[in-house]
Image: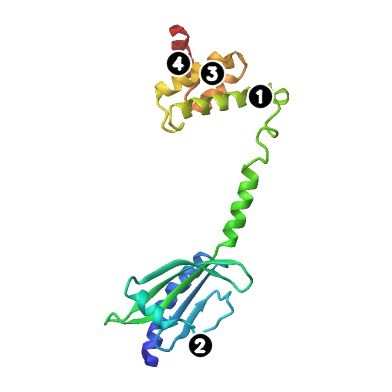
């Protein structure tokens, strides 16, 4: 590839490399390889300590075989020099004659996601669900929790979420709450009405219809 073509390759794909790198700052490295010289043309966020002009170290025979199957290679696993895990994918760039002239590689650090996943799991999951469950004596007066649990149970039984709940679904919820005496508690109607997204007047109407059916 001539210097003119090489410069054109750099100018054409540098903005793409920069866009990908800027979208995932610090965790994505983007490398553009010139297959004719087997050198790195451009690199964004070089955490692999490579620089433009370094040898690409690409197995051209293997690349040629892969290029016959697909222009997208991967994703595949790699290991960074510090031992962290990478998820990589490469795209073959072809000229007007469909000859492979460049390889655009994207390397993503996956350890940061694993750490985030482990952190979320530690916050969400309890080491011993039974031993760590809320003591009944401590929260026995928390009628709001009873409302929440009842609403969740009814919605799960009807296989819907609160947003999709119709009037008949709300009637079932209100009936279930009435059965456990929630509406005998002062302030409960406001809480339930807000939770179900209805007015107090509407709640009282549904509650009256529920009681009349009994």
How many C-alpha atoms fall within 10 Å of the one at disc 1: few (<14), some, or many (≥20)?
A: few
- Residue located 59% across and 61% down the image: 111
The answer for how far apart the CA atoms under marks 3 and 4 are is: 12 Å
Badge 1 or badge 2: first in the primary sequence: 2
What residue is shown with label 4?
206
In three-dimensional space, the C-alpha distance between marks 2 and 4, rounded to whole angstroms, equals 75 Å
At a point 57% along the width and 24% down the height, the residue shown is 147
How far apart, in angstroms, are the residues tagged by discs 1 and 2? 67 Å
**Nearest to the observer: residue 54 or residue 214:** 54
Choose the circle earlier in sequence order: 2 or 4: 2
Where, by quadrant of the figure, is residue 79 drawn?
A: bottom right
Asked if the residue under mark 4 is in contact with the one under mark 3, i.e. CB atoms within 8 Å, the reply is no
User: Is 172 located above or below residue 108 in the figure?
Assistant: above
Q: Gap between marks 3 and 2, in whole Å?
A: 71 Å
Q: Nearer the viewer, mark 3 or mark 4?
A: 3
Name the residue located 40 percent from the left edge and 70 percent from the top edge: 73
Disc 2 vs disc 4: Cβ atoms closer than 8 Å? no
Of marks 1 and 3, which one's residue comes earlier in the chain? Answer: 1
Closest to the observer: 15 or 90?
90
Residue identifier under label 3: 177
Q: Residues within 10 Å of mark 3 (few under 14, many from 20)?
A: some
Element type at marker 2? loop
> Residue 53 bears which disc, if any?
2
Q: Residue furthest left?
A: 97
Instruction: Tell me the residue that label 1 is attached to.
Output: 142
Task: Say which label, 1 or 4, has the lower sequence index.
Answer: 1
Picture coordinates of residue 98 (x, y %)? 28, 79
Secondary structure of the residue carrying tag 3 is: helix
- In the picture provided, is 145 more to the left or to the right than 131? left
- Rendered-image quadrant of the N terminus: bottom left
């Amino acid at each position: 590839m001539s210097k003119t073509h090489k410069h054109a390759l750099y100018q054409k794909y540098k903005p793409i490399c920069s866009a990908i790198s800027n979208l995932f700052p610090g965790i994505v490295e983007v490398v553009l390889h010139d297959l004719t010289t087997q050198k790195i043309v451009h690199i964004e966020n070089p955490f692999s300590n490579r620089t433009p002009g370094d040898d690409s170290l690409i197995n051209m025979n293997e690349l040629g075989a892969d290029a016959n199957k697909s222009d997208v290679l991967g994703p595949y696993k790699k290991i960074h020099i510090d031992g962290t895990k990478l998820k990589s994918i490469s795209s073959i760039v072809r000229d007007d004659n469909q000859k492979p002239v460049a390889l655009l590689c994207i390397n993503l650090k996956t350890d940061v996601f694993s750490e985030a996943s482990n952190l979320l799991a530690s916050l969400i999951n309890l080491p011993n669900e039974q031993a760590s469950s809320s003591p009944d004596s401590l929260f026995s007066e928390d009628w709001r929790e009873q409302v929440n649990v009842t609403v969740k149970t009814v919605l799960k039984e009807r296989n819907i979420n609160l947003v999709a709940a119709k009037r008949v679904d709300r009637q079932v919820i209100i009936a279930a709450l009435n059965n456990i005496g929630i509406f005998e508690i002062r302030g409960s109607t406001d809480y339930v009405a807000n939770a179900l997204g209805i007015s107090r007047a509407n709640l009282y109407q549904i509650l009256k219809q529920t009681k009349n059916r009994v």
